[in-house]
Amino acid sequence: MKSFTDKFGKSWPVEIRFKDIELIRSRLTDDDGKPLNLLDLADQGRLYQILTSTQRMIEIVFLCCLDEVRESFQEEAFDSSHQAEAELIPALKTDRIRKMGFWFGERLNGAAIEEMTEAFKEAIVDFTQNPHLRQALRTVLANQAQLIESQARRIRQESLHILEVTEQAMESQLQKELEVLQPEQVLQALEETVPNPGQKN
């Protein structure tokens, strides 16, 4: 069974059981607003719809880990330490599931979410009984990971290009402004900027 570790060092096992499939379908919706059916998404090769959404991944794994969350969650301690949040989110005053979800989400940082996503991928593959479908699903997930990595590289390249163009434009503008200034103005500006060594502060 795959697991991930939250930012406080607690290990969370991720296993998908039929009851988890039903629980997810009863509480979450897909991109079309229909009940979220993990089995349908896996069969249709559309798991990317949830793997690319951090919020949805957290909600799904939370439901898969609900039994473990119940064992660790202390409602009285949560209520006393989250009074300010409860004023902003009224459901945190009365909805125990919402409280547990909020508590679970607080334990996740970037590293934990990345590890959680990988654990979930393995769990959904393990849930697939047909070995041929299981191998096909592994291939689909690997291809999706490569696509996401490729998109990230493209975004980095575009960001670096924008930065380079911006720096060139700023340098060009500065050069134009310096060309307009007369030599005595430049000298005066430098004298105002650089303190006189003999001058006391």
Image: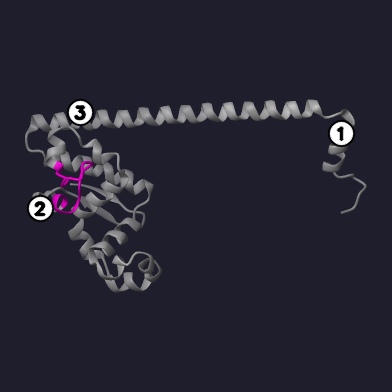
Marking on residue 31:
none
Q: Residue at x 10, y 38 (%)?
A: 128
Q: Earlier in the sequence, mark 2 or mark 3?
A: 2
Secondary structure found at label 2: helix
Q: Amino acid at mark 3?
A: Thr
State the residue position of label 2.
19
- Quadrant of the snapshot with the C terminus: bottom right
12 over 72 or under it: above or below? above
On the question of residue 189 being in view, the answer is: yes
Quote the CA–CA distance across marks 2 and 1: 78 Å
* Disc 1 versus disc 3: nearer the observer: 1
Residues drawn in magenta: 24-38
Left or right: where 167 falls relative to 139:
right
Q: Earlier in the sequence, mark 1 or mark 3?
A: 3
Q: Amino acid at mark 2?
A: Lys
Quote the CA–CA distance across marks 1 and 3: 67 Å
State the residue position of label 3.
139
117 over 95 or under it: above or below? above
Q: Is residue 160 located in the magenta-colored stretch of the structure?
A: no
Q: Position of residue 117 (x, y in %)?
A: 27, 43
| Model colouring | one colour
